[in-house]
Image (tube, rainbow, N blue to C red):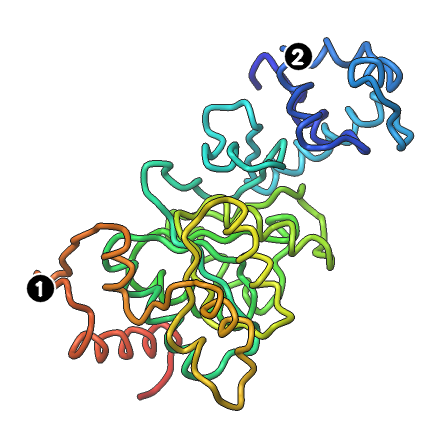
Amino acid sequence: MNERGLLDLIISLMPGLAAKEKIRILNLFKCEEDILILSKEHIEEMLKRKINKNWDINDIRDKADRIDTICKIRSIKWVSYINVSYPPLLREIYDPPTVIFYKGILPDPEKPLLGMAGTRKPSPEGSAQAYKLAFESGKAGISVISGLALGIDSMAHRGNLASGVPGYAVLGSGVDEIFPSINRHLARQIIDSKGALISEYPPGVRPSKWSFPARNRIISALSRSVLIVEAPLKSGALITADFAHEHGKDLWTSSSGVKQGIYDKRGTIKLAQDGAEIIYSGNDILKKWNMKVSDNNGNTDFSGAEVSDIVFSMANFLKIEI
């Protein structure tokens, strides 16, 4: 353990404090012992306000110790805001997590990520396009970050992993509490790809209604651009789109997301009407990122014959007969 000990984890667990206040306290102390001699009243005096939660610093320290022990047992790592390993893009948002927990290897800050999100109940065309766009991006060396939910998220993760790049998922629960449970195998594949499962919640925390919108801000923050494949008007994916606007990210939607039909795509249709650019293929993403990356055959055009390769890879990855 470094000289700070459990200091940063202790501060992250202090209830009633805003993200910026926790970060301010992080920067004021250098070791665990410095904060353990303080009471809640001392912290209130530092912040110049009352904290509307009751707590005892020693109880918080005990909780931090239990969490740290569980992390070690379950091969979960944690890193604080002031650590050099903390993702730099996450520091730039208004309310960054004081501490993030992860299994696997955090993304290389020098390699931009593509955020992908969408409805849990996509059209067949939307599912196929999510897989295809993620696969094509991966063939160009671009990793996708998404939320491990059913529907578009799952298809994006699968397509990207099938291309051979590391995958990344941000959870609305502890990284040991995979939700939905049907995606446990997919979560393992993400870790095995030398990617990571990432969360601001300690191990053992179950997902809740409010934790999913919160995790969406992390997906947006870690992305260079955010692609909403398909979404109805009332969709968590549109919360991700709002965060993309707030964070100054490129916001795109897919061509399948703007096609009328029996599936509810009013959310992505509205995004396009409000100015989100429409993505048709992986080439569109490469062009917008000013990338020129050849596939194994020296081609940069993912259209035409490449589609059959993608369909085959999708079927192989999902163990589907074609």
Q: Position of residue 227 (x, y in %)?
A: 43, 61
Give the secondary structure at mark 1: loop
Viewer-side label of 1, 2: 2
Quickly name the residue at label 2: 28
Q: Residue furthest bottom?
A: 262
Cα gap from disc 1 to disc 2, whole angstroms: 55 Å
Q: Position of residue 211 (x, y in %)?
A: 69, 52
Q: Give me the disc on residue 61.
A: none
Please determine whether, in this image, residue 90 is positioned above or below residue 55: below
Going 56% across and 51% down the picture, which residue do you hit? 243
Going 57% across and 63% down the picture, which residue do you hit? 238
Quickly name the residue at label 1: 297
Q: Position of residue 49 (x, y in %)?
A: 85, 22
Going 44% across and 63% down the picture, which residue do you hit? 275
Give the secondary structure at mark 2: helix
Q: Nearer the viewer, residue 193 or 92?
A: 92
Amino acid tagged 2: Leu
Label 1 or label 2, whichever comes before in sequence order: 2
Going 46% across and 37% down the picture, which residue do you hit? 89
Q: Residue furthest front?
A: 274
